[in-house]
Image (cartoon, coloured by chain):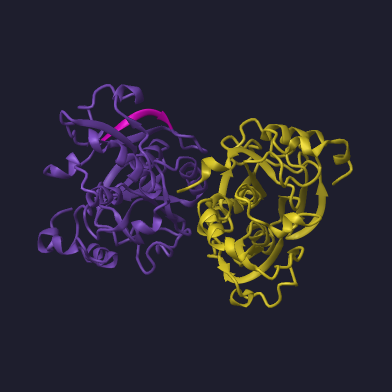
Chain colours: A purple, B yellow
Amino acid sequence: MTAHSRSLDKASLRYAVPAKVRLAARSGALASATHGLARGYVQANLAILPERYAFDFLRFCLRNPKPCPIVEVTDPGDPQPRLSAPGADIRTDLPGYRIYRDGKFVEEVGSIEAHWREDSVAFLLGCSNSFDQILLRHGIAQRHTEGADGRISVYRSNIECVPAGIFHGPVAVTMRPIPSKDVVQVVELSSRFPIAHGAPVHIGDPAAIGIADLKQVEWGRYNEPGPDDVPVYWACGVTPQAVAMAAHIPEMITHSPGHMFVTDLHIDDLRTG
Amino acid sequence: MTAHSRSLDKASLRYAVPAKVRLAARSGALASATHGLARGYVQANLAILPERYAFDFLRFCLRNPKPCPIVEVTDPGDPQPRLSAPGADIRTDLPGYRIYRDGKFVEEVGSIEAHWREDSVAFLLGCSNSFDQILLRHGIAQRHTEGADGRISVYRSNIECVPAGIFHGPVAVTMRPIPSKDVVQVVELSSRFPIAHGAPVHIGDPAAIGIADLKQVEWGRYNEPGPDDVPVYWACGVTPQAVAMAAHIPEMITHSPGHMFVTDLHIDDLRTG
């Protein structure tokens, strides 16, 4: 996914308007992760399912708003997210996609025009990339953005999602090592952004939510808490994908990890309280 | 719908837990409006549709959160609202129901056990009864609760809902005459309760939202603003019903006007900000 990205000055997209990031993805110039691009704008996880699973999946998202905050659900067959990014095309405007068949990863592609069907429904779900920008703005240290590749630590917790139809499974959580003095502020800040997974699901002991060993991440990489850090856990957008994969949907399409859809919604417009 | 209600001391339900109100409806002892009952708890509009319309209708509700704040959507065929009122039965626990066929009113009944099907999906949508309690708590005068029957003024505005599938139409609005000195506080308060329709859609001149004459209500009754009152308009839960009726769903069931479903959710738990 990085072949073309060398030809693009990615730094120029940091404060770009969202449409510019989307067009860079559409042209193939941007084929890498979107973390830190179009700062201030809501980025979204993508899951595309056939319509016959969509009502079950939408109830699942509604019942589990922390892992699955709904940004927009498109009409069957309509590739345009008319509310969150009018004029955008969900088939081309992400820098990378993954195709799954019967719950198994098949291939990674740069556009999905060949896979889009009359009954395709796109779910755009909130993502913590947006929240990272809030923490940055408030000067709160984040270990995973200090590292080389910016990947966060993701685990399977023992917290069960509320099921809906064929969809059920555990809540996947991200862990951020947060400086002890900042933990209260981080809870306050994140609670105001339900669209970016909202308040943490847990603070402190990983065993309390079924994580035996923090070093053993399920996705991403391990970001070690420093001596004055507290591990803080948020519900993660990997949850709905993992749940949909476990349900063995015949064909499902998602974004490639970190290759999110950048919406026209400003994160501050979706702040509550 | 009021035959049995005389045998019940309705005042005893004002501060009752929600289950007590629901059981009174189930037994037939309560067959009248729920305004002011189980104070502090969220009351909900009910719309029951066949599953094949449910995904479209749910997208409609998501896209129009002010008129259609989603409390819960049940699984097809499951009459229990497992999240908002575990143990309740949507078929019996409202004090009155209306049956519509092809968009036309057919009959009013006290329970819908005979009408509930394998593919019935119940939508519970937020209602301003909850919000009225907030205003009451803050000592803000409301003309419609001072009157004889407590009915509010409801109009068809010229604000168009965002369509979804077969569902489209104008936003229905309630009008409350609010004392001029309280208008700012009323906006602040209501904006914190998206589950009860959130902030107003308009303040002041009815013509600006397509209402030619305030005296000509579409539903409810006219509540005349006093000399120091300002008309303030909120999106109304009649909207999704009117839109579903206009779509000529073969069979749809709703609550009877004012005969709401009382959930176990406390309004303060759903406050944002």
On screen, residue B49 versus residue A254, left or right, reads right
Residue B31 x/y as whole percent: 81, 42
On screen, residue B101 versus residue A214, left or right, reads right
Residue B93 x/y as whole percent: 73, 38
Numbered label tally: 0
Range shown magenta: A154-160
Q: Nearer the viewer, residue B144 or B32?
A: B144
Quarter where residue B151 is shown:
bottom right
Q: For the point 46% across and 37% down, which residue is it? A: A167
Residue B188 seen from this side: yes
Q: Nearer the viewer, residue A159 or B149?
A: B149
Q: Nearer the viewer, residue B149 or A254?
A: B149
Is residue A157 part of the magenta span, yes or no? yes
Quarter where residue A215 is shown:
top left
Quarter where residue B208 is shown:
bottom right
Q: For the point 60% across and 61% down, which residue is it? A: B235
Residue B200 x/y as whole percent: 56, 62
Residue B167 x/y as whole percent: 60, 62
Residue B51 seen from this side: no
Q: Nearer the viewer, residue B2 or A188?
A: A188
Q: For the point 31% across and 34% down, which residue is it? A: A233
Helix, strand or loop: magenta stretch = strand
Is residue B259 part of the magenta span, yes or no? no
Q: For the point 48% across and 59% down, which residue is it? A: A75
